[in-house]
Image (cartoon, rainbow, N blue to C red):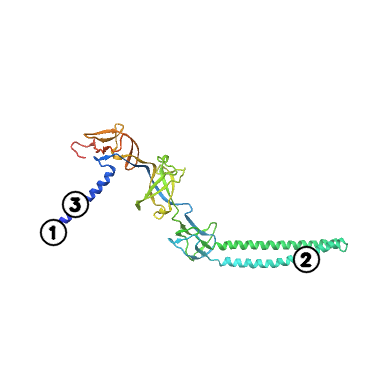
Amino acid sequence: MIMKKKYVVIAAIILIAGGVLVFLFSGNKASQGKAGQDVTVKRGNVTHFTEQTGIIKAQVGAIVKVGTRATGTLTYLKYQVGDAVKKGELIATIDDREILANIRNTEATIESLKKDLEAKEAQYVYSKTNYERELSLLEKEFTTRDSVDKAKREMDVALAQVEYGTAKIKESAERRKALEVSLSYTKIYAPISGYVSAVSTQLGETVVSGLSAAILITIIDPSKLEMWIYVDETDIGRTTPGRKIEYWVDTFRDKRFYGKIDMIYPQPEIKDNIVYYLAIVKIAPEDTAFLRPEMTTHVRIIVEEKTDVLVIPNNAVRFEEGKTIVYLKGRDKTEARQVTLGIRDDRFTEVVKGLEEGETIVVPVVVRKPSQNASPGSKK
């Protein structure tokens, strides 16, 4: 008795589950118009679109390879792959002892040259005073022309030494500036905020800077993303900048993202002998939390939208003998009526002429004709 009750309960559960599935399935079909079903002509919205494929990409400037022009041992490296970085934070340092020693040596040289210059300036002042005195004595004929010429030569030599000393100090000062610039290369700061996507060297390694900067780490800003849409050449005529789009990715199939086309590259791309044109869409910052570079996107480009127009299910329309018809339900019989259609989407078609709001049409049942190759008596 207990076993019989158990089977009855199980059978009841199966029947209930089956009923729920049938209800859900029939509900989905009703939105499209089930074959043989009566549908009332009503007003609604229709969105005509084209379906394309896209790829999530990082914007220009969103990925930065951080390097250094200094040569030396890496003494500090704080971040690793996946770490968050803020703009201006210290990322790494390179051994700067040699550069600091050269800076101190240059500063000492400058101080020495300054003291030597003071002596040369004093000599020049004395030589100039002596030359002026000799000129005064020559006017009174208390000295000779040779003495004046000698004093002038001494003054010119002293002046040249002063100019040379000044130039040497300036040269050393410029060298010190160059060393200070080189010193700045030993401290590397984050140029943008983001996440570390790659680390090219490790703590303790020697970095050698050549003609180009040695790359230390790569930072990516995940908030700066864009989408590349590969638009088929047959659809590019209906695709223009400013068009609205709707898209989704496989990992979030139930979530819809929206945007608009910013630009279209004039240069085509050919893949598998098919011509595509690249349409660029900037991704909203709030959507970047769900998206990653190189994700494949399924895109709908909105070509035309109409609101509050007469609509019928797509499968209610038939094409017979070159005419577009629907089956209008009357009191006694169903008759075919020719209609003029507008745009359509994946569910509904706009009716421009031939039907009135509130009229009832019937979704026709598709009758499949037997195959000519089928043998007599065979069933398909």
The reply, left or right, for residue 59 in relation to residue 46 is: right
- Circles 3, 2 touching at the beta carbon (< 8 Å): no
Residue 100 placement (x, y as % from top left)? 58, 67
Residue with the mark numbered 2: 126
Residue with the mark numbered 1: 3
Residue 9 placement (x, y as % from top left)? 16, 56
What residue is shown at x 57% (from left), y 62% (from top)? 182
For label 1, the SS is helix
- Circles 3, 1 touching at the beta carbon (< 8 Å): no
What residue is shown at x 76% (from left), y 62% (from top)? 157
The amino acid on which the numbered mark 2 sits, given as a three-letter code, is Tyr
Q: Nearer the viewer, residue 242 or 40?
A: 40
What residue is shown at x 79% (from left), y 61% (from top)? 153
What residue is shown at x 84% (from left), y 62% (from top)? 136
The amino acid on which the numbered mark 1 sits, given as a three-letter code, is Met
Q: Quadrant of residue 232?
A: top left
Q: Residues within 10 Å of mark 2 (few under 14, many from 20)?
A: some
Q: Mark 3 or mark 2: which comes first in sequence?
A: 3
Residue 154 placement (x, y as % from top left)? 78, 63
Cα separation between marks 3 and 1:
19 Å
Q: Nearer the viewer, residue 292 or 42?
A: 42
Q: Nearer the viewer, residue 115 or 48?
A: 48
Q: Nearer the viewer, mark 2 or mark 1?
A: 1
Q: Nearer the viewer, residue 257 or 224?
A: 257
For label 3, the SS is helix
The amino acid on which the numbered mark 3 sits, given as a three-letter code, is Leu
Residue 318 placement (x, y as % from top left)? 29, 36
Cα separation between marks 2 and 1:
129 Å
Q: Residues within 10 Å of mark 3 (few under 14, many from 20)?
A: few
Q: Mark 3 or mark 1: which comes first in sequence?
A: 1
